[in-house]
């Protein structure tokens, strides 16, 4: 077994794809003609977005909408970069909200946290041991 992809439910798939492109430089790989599902080109493991309406169809009891939750969900997407402060600033300029400014962890990794307009929590970090 291996991780194939991660799907995050969002209010506007095209807007999330565009934001991740502008904020993090990730290119769109696919957007379904219905606009309810899309993927980013993130390497072997794909980061995907699906519309809340699909989540509501898949789960009889509904699901938590990250974009309307007052607190970030207990789940994050980690993006690895060599320059966390620059990536953090670029994401803020694109519309992300700062959750924690870049800081160096005791193990040497530089880490920051952002919340995207669609509610997704993103960790920006240098490589572990790098």
Image (spheres, grey):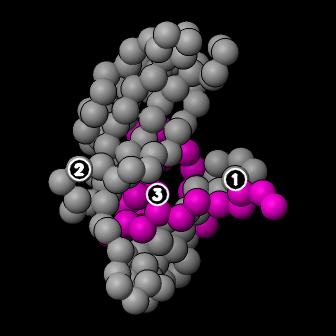
Q: Secondary structure at mark 3?
A: helix
Residue at the image point whose x is 41% and y is 75% from the top: 51
Q: Secondary structure at mark 2?
A: loop
Residue at the image point whose x is 71% and y is 57% from the top: 3
Task: Mark 3 or mark 1: name the one nearer the start of the chain.
Answer: 3
Residue 22 visible from this viewpoint: no
Q: Which mark is residue 45?
A: 1
Residue 103: where, in percent of width, then height?
Answer: 39, 15
Q: Which image quadrant for residue 6?
A: bottom right
Q: Can you identify the residue that label 2 sits on? A: 71
Residue 105 visible from this viewpoint: yes
Residue 8: where, in percent of width, then height?
Answer: 47, 63
Which marked residue is nearer to the observer: mark 3 or mark 1?
1
Residue 34: where, in percent of width, then height?
Answer: 48, 84
Q: Is residue 51 above or below residue 39?
A: below
Q: Can you identify the residue that label 3 sits on? A: 17
Given residues 72 and 98, the one toward you in this image is: 72
């Amino acid at each position: 077994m291996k991780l194939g992809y991660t799907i995050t439910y969002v209010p506007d798939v095209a807007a999330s794809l565009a934001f991740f492109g502008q904020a993090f430089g990730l290119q769109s790989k696919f957007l379904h003609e219905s606009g309810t599902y899309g993927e980013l080109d993130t390497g072997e493991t794909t980061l995907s977005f699906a519309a809340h309406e699909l989540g509501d169809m898949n789960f009889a009891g509904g699901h938590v909408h990250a974009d309307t939750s007052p607190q970030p969900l207990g789940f994050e997407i980690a993006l690895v970069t060599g320059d966390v402060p620059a990536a953090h600033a670029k994401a803020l300029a694109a519309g992300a909200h700062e959750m924690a400014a870049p800081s160096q962890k005791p193990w040497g990794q530089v880490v920051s946290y952002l919340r995207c307009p669609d509610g997704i929590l993103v960790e920006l970090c240098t490589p572990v041991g790098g």
